[in-house]
Image (tube, rainbow, N blue to C red):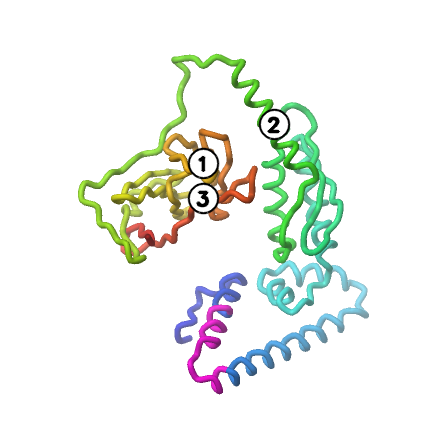
Amino acid sequence: MSEVQEQYLNAEGMVEQLNLLVEQIESYPDAKIREKTLDLVQIILALHREALRRVLTSLDSLPEKEQLLSQIAGDDVVRAILLIHGLLPNDLQTRVAAAIDELRPFLISQGGDVELLGVNDGHARMRLMRNGQGAPPISALKLEIEKALIEAAPELLGIEIEGEAEQIEATAKAAAILGSMIPKKSNEPQPPKLIQIKRTNPVVNHDGKWVSVIRSLTFEEGAFKIINYADVNILVCKTGGDFYAFRNCCASENRPLDDATFESSMLICACHGYHYDLRRKGRCVEKPDLKLGSLPVKIEDDKVKVAL
């Protein structure tokens, strides 16, 4: 199979490989060969789209059409191809509404609820409600909705929560007032701090190449470590079996994250209480415009390597 190996058997991997090959074709120096190859790709895609359109049309006369279409679109690979060709059986709003309806019982059981207000220009607008003092914060409810919609509507451009900024601001003010009213006890257990590793003879690399920062086999699941490489302060973590690396500074005020705590895939800043989702490149849940400085990371020969 030449360089295209069997590891690209999932929809996302194959689409990424296809995009990579197209980019390589577009940068090919011979203009005639480049244009002919791109024309070939377009003809193949157009042929596939027409064939898929005819297959879907042939289901119109069947009484079990809706059930068959649901099963077809439920396959990751098929859904990715139908999405590329704009042939998904249901439109964006229908799929978003179905995903929300399926998620509502879970949200209600957690003390929350959601109402879809509409889908316009690729953005879903909705209203979130919290019922009772024990209900999760709006940011946590929004995160659950984002997870559900990534599967049902991957082409969705964003989610807009009605009054989200006001609710987050009110929650932050209430938390600040409550915190000032509760005296801190000296014997109160403190959250665990991140482990710091300092190298006496750091290997500094300023030309953008990969450098080894720590061994992967000794790195425990759910652990965070701060590694100082000369003038570069790196935060390395492992969650869900994957490694992530970021510059060790809060996205809000560039303060070090040495006192941050870790829950699931969330890094919680001790200064502001912001939740940074490490699996979404360190994006802040409360303020999506804030994001940690992500660094490329890879595993090679039992070494965690970071591109600096």
The amino acid beneath tag 1 is Glu
- Residue 171: numbered disc: 2
Report the side of 261 relative to 288 (left or right): left
Q: Position of residue 226 (x, y in %)?
A: 33, 39
Above or below: residue 93 compared with residue 252: below
- Foreground disc of the pair 3, 1: 1
Q: What is the CA distance from the residue labelled 3 to the residue labelled 1?
A: 11 Å
Q: Residue at x 54, y 13 (%)?
A: 181
Location of residue 172 (image quadrant): top right
Q: Nearer the viewer, residue 172 or 2?
A: 172
Disc 1 on helix, strand or loop? loop
Q: Which residue is mark 3?
A: 292
Above or below: residue 123 compared with residue 42: above
**Which numbered disc, 2 or 3, marks the residue that appears first in the sequence?**
2
Dominant secondary structure of the residues highlighted in magenta in the image: helix
Q: Nearer the viewer, residue 153 or 281?
A: 281
**Which numbered disc, 2 or 1, marks the residue that appears first in the sequence?**
2
Location of residue 231 (image quadrant): top left
Q: Which residues are magenta?
A: 19-34
Q: Position of residue 206 (x, y in %)?
A: 28, 54
Q: What is the CA distance from the residue labelled 2 to the residue labelled 1?
A: 20 Å
User: Is residue 229 one of those drawn in magenta?
Assistant: no
The amino acid beneath tag 3 is Leu
Q: What is the CA distance from the residue labelled 2 to the residue labelled 3?
A: 23 Å
Disc 3 on helix, strand or loop? loop
Q: Are marks 2 and 1 in contact (CB under 8 Å)?
A: no
The amino acid beneath tag 2 is Thr
Q: Which residue is mark 1?
A: 253
Report the side of 12 relative to 117 (left or right): left
Q: Residue at x 73, y 49 (%)?
A: 97
Q: Are marks 2 and 3 in contact (CB under 8 Å)?
A: no
